[in-house]
Amino acid sequence: MKKPALALMFLLLMAGTVAADENGGGSEGEASFGGLAAFGVGLVFTGVAYYSLTKRRLIIEHRKGSPQIVVRPERPYITVFGPVYPMTVHHAFTVTGTLLALIHFATCRDYSTLAGKAGLGMAIVLILMNISGFYGRYIHVKLEMAARKKQSGKLKRLAVLLRRWKLFHVALAGLFLILLGIHIAAVGD
Ligand code: HEM
Ligand code: HEM
């Protein structure tokens, strides 16, 4: 993994543990570190939103360069200059967010409640999303190589595979949102 992505993940992990500092607690069978999970889910959302917005140049655009933020009165309003690509931000934020949420998940001893089942579902979906994410990046790299080498047959095949992969990746994100809604409603009862 690239050094900037690792450095970003380390920084976020530290920020997460400081921001959501608590001593565990939680009665028997119940999960602790809910604050850490909330911070982790916040990171996942930020990582998805940043990639999604910059990709479409909606509100924010991202350019390579020394770090600074420029705000203008016309679209896309905000230009963020940074040393990493938006995909690296997506990658680092979603992986770190997943790790923080899994700490909360691992402290639960009773997965039979509605909140527990939704939590178990989210943990599985998060792990699948991360694995699928790395596979998607792999297809992206293969596709770029095929484009550079002008291998049109391979390019077409990879483009179809990428479209299918993306559908799967985004569908999992939708499923995660539904489970999160159920989880929050159930723990709030
Ligand atoms: C916004 C994010 C989240 C918040 C605020 C949150 C909060 C909570 C709270 C308050 C509890 C009950 C603990 C208690 O009563 O002591 C709980 C339980 C649990 N959470 Fe989360 N959670 C979040 C995300 C997640 C995620 C992403 C997962 C899975 C990766 C997860 C898995 C679990 C599990 C398995 C339990 C145990 C079920 C139970 O206690 O009945 N949570 N969560
Ligand atoms: C909890 C974890 C994750 C969630 C919820 C998530 C969610 C999403 C969503 C919603 C998109 C579509 C964005 C858009 O087009 O507007 C996306 C795109 C993408 N994600 Fe993830 N993702 C996660 C983890 C990862 C990881 C770990 C990687 C691997 C490094 C990854 C790689 C990608 C790639 C390559 C795309 C771009 C597809 C494209 O624009 O062609 N994702 N992700």
Image: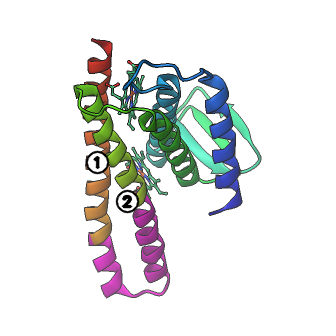
Q: CA distance from mark 2 to mark 1?
A: 10 Å
Instruction: Indicate left or right for 186 with 63 as reference.
Output: left
What number is the disc on residue 172?
Answer: 1
Is ligand 2 less than 8 Å from the beta carbon at label 1? Answer: yes
The secondary structure type at the circle numbered 2 is: helix
Q: Percent from the top left, x then y, of residue 141?
A: 48, 72
| Residue 58 makes an appearance in the image | no
Q: Position of residue 169 (x, y in %)?
A: 32, 53
Asked whether disc 2 touches disc 1, contact meaning CB atoms under 8 Å apart, the reply is: yes
On residue 132, the disc is 2
Of 92 and 33, the residue lying toward us: 33
Q: Residue sitting at 37 percent across and 59 percent down? A: 132
Dot 1 alpha-carbon crowd within 10 angstroms: few under 14, some 14 to 19, many 20 or more: some
Quadrant in the rendering for residue 108: top left
Q: Position of residue 167 (x, y in %)?
A: 26, 55
In the depicted structure, whether residue 49 falls above or below residue 19: below
Report the image quarter containing ligand 1: top left
Whole-percent x, y for residue 90 in the image? 51, 48
Ligand 2 within 8 Å, label 2 CB: yes
Residue 88 lies in the magenta stretch: no
Q: Horizontal placement of 145 versus 167: left or right?
A: right
Magenta span:
133-160
Which of the two residues, 54 or 172, is positioned nearer the viewer here? 172
Quadrant of image for the C terminus: top left
**Point 45% across, 33% down: residue:** 107
Which residue does the image show at 39% across and 51% down from the upper left? 127
Name the kind of residue labelled 1 in the image: Leu
Taking the image as shown, residue 135 lies to the left or right of residue 148, namely left
Q: Is residue 84 above or below residue 121?
A: below
